[in-house]
Amino acid sequence: MKAIILSAGKGERLLPLTKDRPKICVELGDGTTLLSRQAGTLFRHKEIDEIIIGAGHCVERVEEFASMTVDQGNMTIIYNPFYAVSGPLVTLWVVLNRLRSSDFIFMNGDTFYSDAVYDSIVSYFSNGKEGIYLLCSRTGKVDPDDVKVRLNQNSEVLEATKSATGLDIISAGLMMVIGEKSSTVFREILDRVSRRDDFLSHKKTWHSFIKDLSGEGVGVHPLLVEKSEWAEVDIHNDLENLQRLL
């Protein structure tokens, strides 16, 4: 299985820390970064044989990190030349056009996950549970910046958006695609979406692509994990909270 980390954006809400580096290379205060922690956790799972980073802003800093970790595992950097005018869905599209594996997970570069999360993912992969999955959490406290998840009557993900209200399930920022059939359908629909006029837009997130999948009858299954098992870093307060947690 390949693990794709989407980290091409400028991370402007963390300025000035991201002026000369992508968000995943910001120091966490203990000598580590989000990237070093993500990579370390992923490389501990032998089922994940390659980490692929979709990079853009200050790509040289990511390449520098990769050159120092060659003894830990296989890491590939794929540059998104459209990062300044596009969102993470375009970065995913660029990466998948270079990827031949049918089994992959992809995640936001600004999110930290515990070993328990990757244990659950690897369990699904090892048991051959073909399908498309969105990592989610139930929470009693929904933040306006959270991506809220709406399910249909079959308990499949209908859409994931920040604008929804009255929902208690949020996205944990990671999707998993297992099996050749699921991978083929995912890529075919993404290629069709890439031909739309709004594809090169910062508003076109990969969460918005879930609605495209469900609109064509493709089931996206929620994979629930505890909210305490992951943390997202969008703003300075998030970074401070993660530093205290670590």
Image (cartoon, grey):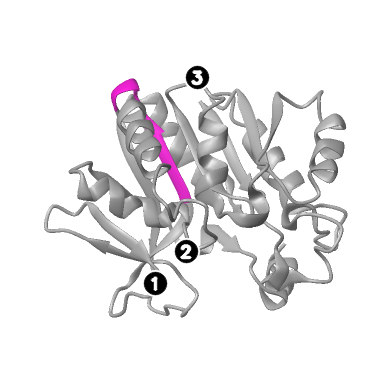
Residue, x 64% and y 32% (percent of image)?
51
Mark 3 → mark 2, Cα distance in angstroms: 32 Å
Q: Nearer the viewer, residue 227 or 193?
A: 193
**Upstream in the sequence, badge 3 or badge 2?**
3
**Pointers 2 and 1 in contact (CB under 8 A)?**
yes
Give the residue type that dot 2 points to.
Lys
Is residue 173 placed above or below 233 in the rendered structure? above
Is residue 242 placed above or below 166 in the rendered structure? above
Residue bearing the label numbered 2 = 227
180 within the magenta span: yes
**Upstream in the sequence, badge 3 or badge 1?**
3
Residue bearing the label numbered 3 = 100
Give the residue type that dot 1 points to.
Thr
The stretch in magenta equals 174-181
Residue bearing the label numbered 1 = 139
**Number of residues whose C-alpha sits closer than 10 Å to that of mark 2, classed few (under 14), some (14–19) or many (20 or more):** some
Mark 3 → mark 1, Cα distance in angstroms: 36 Å
Which numbered disc, 3 or 2, marks the residue closer to the eye?
Answer: 3
Q: Position of residue 20 (x, y in %)?
A: 87, 58
| SS at mark 3 in the image | loop
**Number of residues whose C-alpha sits closer than 10 Å to that of mark 3, classed few (under 14), some (14–19) or many (20 or more):** few
| SS at mark 1 in the image | loop
